[in-house]
Image (cartoon, rainbow, N blue to C red):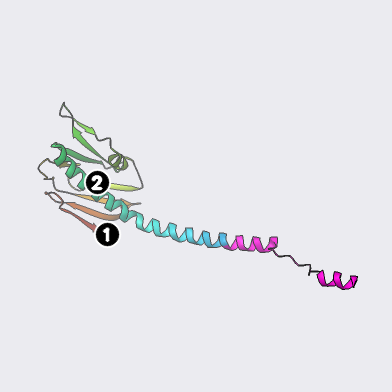
Amino acid sequence: MGGFGRAGSRMKNSSRGFTLVEILIVFALVATFAALAVAGFSRFYNERLPRLYVKDLAGYVRYLQFKAIEDGKIYRMTVDNDTGVSTASKPNAKKDFEPLRDALSRRFQKKGEFAVVLGEGHEVYFFPDGTVTRNAVTVSRNGGEIATLQIKNRLGALEIHYAS
């Protein structure tokens, strides 16, 4: 009976976990799928980035329009054609224009991968009554035109024309 007890109580000697090879295979698959997902997202983001920049720039123009009305002051947006950096300024007590120092203005004051060029002259004025000097702002990247913002002479009159 002693033998029967031992044989009956013996369990099969098999492991109940995963082997190191199985775990490594799963990690390799997860890493491969993650890399594919990141590559796809990166491509999607890079394709959308120019349109996002143009929409942000249009929002910035509208922001300057409302800021001029709210503060009762004239604001000016200038673009340096060499660097593509656009800046906004407001008149100080001496009637000179000084750069705005808010976060939104700083975003467009940095040289980035997009070039911004004004079509007529080198500045756009935003007046307290909501009127704006007419102009066209062309946005390009690596020498290729992305879009043109047509700034009309009244509040909110802004059209975006994307290049084909």
Quadrant of the rendered image containing residue 9: bottom right
Q: Could you tell me which quadrant the N terminus lies in?
A: bottom right
Q: Which residue is outermost to the left?
A: 129
For the residue labelled by badge 1, is the local secondary structure a helix, a strand or a loop? loop
In this orientation, does residue 144 appear?
Answer: no
The amino acid pointed to by label 2 is Tyr
Q: Earlier in the sequence, mark 1 or mark 2?
A: 2
Q: Which residues, given as a range, are shown in magenta?
A: 1-29
Question: Does 123 sit left or right of 29 as displayed?
Answer: left
Q: Position of residue 164 (x, y in %)?
A: 28, 62
Residue 6 belongs to the span the image colors magenta: yes
Quadrant of the rendered image containing residue 50: bottom left
Q: Residue at x 9, y 42 (%)?
A: 129
In this orientation, does residue 47 appear?
Answer: yes
**Residue indicated by mark 1:** 163
Q: CA distance from mark 1 to mark 2?
A: 20 Å
Q: Residue at x 26, y 55 (%)?
A: 147
Residue 97 sits above or below residue 112 on the image: above
**Residue indicated by mark 2:** 60
For the residue labelled by badge 2, is the local secondary structure a helix, a strand or a loop? helix
Residue 86 belongs to the span the image colors magenta: no
The amino acid pointed to by label 1 is Ala
Q: Position of residue 49 (x, y in %)?
A: 35, 54
**1 or 2: mark nearer the eye:** 2
Q: Position of residue 92 (x, y in %)?
A: 18, 29
Quadrant of the rendered image containing residue 95: top left
Task: Check whether the beta carbons of the residues at disc 1 and disc 2 lie within 8 A of each other.
Answer: no
Q: Residue at x 27, y 47 (%)?
A: 116
How many C-alpha atoms fall within 10 Å of the one at disc 1: few (<14), some, or many (≥20)? Answer: few
* Dominant secondary structure of the residues highlighted in magenta in the image: helix
